[in-house]
Amino acid sequence: MSLIATLARLEAVNSGRAQPTATVRHRHLSDRPLVFVPLTTAGEAGAPLGALVGTDRDTPRLLAVPQPRDRDLRFAFLAELADVVLPYIDSYADAVEAAERNETDPETGKRVKVEVELCADAPQLIVPSRAGVDYVRLLGRSTRFRRTAEQDPESPHPAPPHVPLLGRWLTHFGERARVPGSSLLLALTEVLGRHWATGQSSLEDQHLGALLAWLDPPEGESGVRAAQWAELARDADGQLRCPPAGPATDPAFDNKLLAPAIERYDRARTALAAAEDGLEADDRLGALTAAEREVHELVRSRTLPTWQAVWRGLDLLRELPEGAHVEERWTRDRWSFTGHRDRVTAGEPPQPRRDDAVTAANKLATREREQARLEAQEALDDPLVMAGRRLAGEAFAGEVIDVVMAYSESKRPSPRPLVTVRTDDRPQLAERAKAYRSLGGKPQAAEFVEQAAEGVLVLRIVDRMGRGKEPEAGSVPEKGDRLCFTLFEHEQRGGAKLPDPEETPWTHGGPPGEQVPEAPDSVTQEDLL
């Protein structure tokens, strides 16, 4: 945690309200996000109990499973979820624009630009908390390998037709959520926590109701008291007034309301199956319908407060202006969405349960590179974030007090002006250390020469001054300019190219020998639904 974030938390405790840790919004928000508030059953990993899902804050679609142990009812829930999610995804798949991408020419081996299609926009899935992201990943893993009746007529429990496709898309959203800065799948508590600091722990911030209580407490109420009410307040029946939908449920709700309702549903279903004539069956069908409706209303009562809280949190985020680099990161999300759309359309198989060594290494390298890029871009977009880097000695700001033109010692001298900056910051500069400033959206590098006096630094500008002997206009700082230099690079370099999978050393799962593919749909404890 940065010093700025620590100070903000202390100020939140002192003032009773959350304190901003950003002045701009560092994540993309779609004009039409798909909000997904899931609810799971206690005692069985990932078993769905219900959900509220939709793009309209006033008309969410309620999905519920009246008996979570029934496989057919679980598949019916997943089929209904697919009926909502897949059309939403498809609505972004057809609108495309022309874009250029660098690819390797198979004949020459050189990198060339080719024109390809890029989706003009991409879908965005929003869940209340980090546990919701994990649940989306679990749903994807548990469904993408399921066999339908068309694929396997002899399957004892075939999945509805679109459920495996739903699983492939949920897996893609879950994998993309692991890339720093991605916005295809967002946990609202993490996005809010990135922009505001509360007076409670990061774990307590995962309760969306408590987090919003700090951000926007009721009139005349402090954040800490409002958060305590959101976490602990119960009604006369002992039920939480602000159910978290975590997506786990509250034990008091399970024991006092849900379990009896499911038991009544089971009795009504058993009675209907034992009915001997039509009149008796009609009466018992009415009882079964009433029992099912009761479970639906219980699910709605637990998810609706969180549904409303998600939209309230989105309203708070939309009040912040979007950061300058957010659109660039969203473009990379659009490339990711377009690529997966093309793989699905081409009929490629689902994502494997385990990545091979090259794929895993590439994913890890991508996440490390994107994390460094995200941290740099957030600092460049936001003076409050940059202040934290300055306090850490990773950047400094000051006024130019002198500029002396100098040239390199070579056959063709190039401009190497010396810029003297007075600063109150204390950067961690070593001899000949590199520093960078943003010039027209691109990094201009400088080299630390010496510390002329206390708080006075001399830097040598080394690039982005044109090809001539004289620097281009505006490329060299002038006396009186206020500048901010960073000690971290603004653009991240790619690592060494990894070998193709068929050329991977045997120590990493490659040749020699024919590799026997692992059964993709082996059931593990985490796959239980």
Image: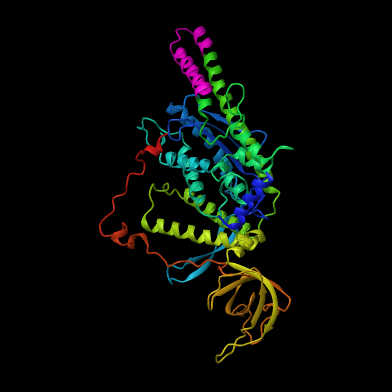
Depth check: give the residue in front, 447 or 165.
447
Q: Looking at the image, is 296 positioned above or below residue 371?
A: above
| Frontmost residue, 413 versus 73 | 413
Dominant SS of magenta comes to helix
Confirm whether the magenta stretch covers residue 121: no
Residue that lies at the very extreme toward the bottom in this rendered image: 411
In which quadrant of the rendered image does the C terminus lie? top left
Q: Quadrant where the N terminus lies? A: bottom right
Residue 252 at what x, y percent from top left? 52, 25
Q: Nearer the viewer, residue 195 or 27?
A: 195
Q: Is residue 367 above or below residue 230?
A: below
Question: What residue is rendered at 51% in x and 47% in y?
Answer: 173
Where residue 414 appears, x then y in whole percent? 60, 86
Q: Indicate whether 119 appears above or below 164.
A: below
Query: Could you tell me which residue is drawn at 56 percent across and 57 percent down?
Result: 332
Q: Residue at x 40, y 41 (%)?
A: 145
- Whole-percent x, y for residue 119 in the image: 58, 53
Q: Nearer the viewer, residue 72 or 142?
A: 142
Whether residue 56 is visible here, answered yes or no, is no
> Image quarter for residue 361?
bottom left
Q: Most extreme residue toward the left, as rendered?
A: 513
Span shown in magenta: 255-284
Left or right? Give the position of 515 relative to 231.
left
The answer to whether residue 40 is seen in the rendering is yes
Percent coordinates x, y for residue 243 in the rendering: 58, 32
In which quarter of the view is residue 373 placed? bottom right
Q: Is 256 in the magenta?
A: yes
In the image, residue 333 sits, relative to residue 17, either above or below, namely below
User: Is 370 on the left-hand or right-hand side of 423?
Assistant: left
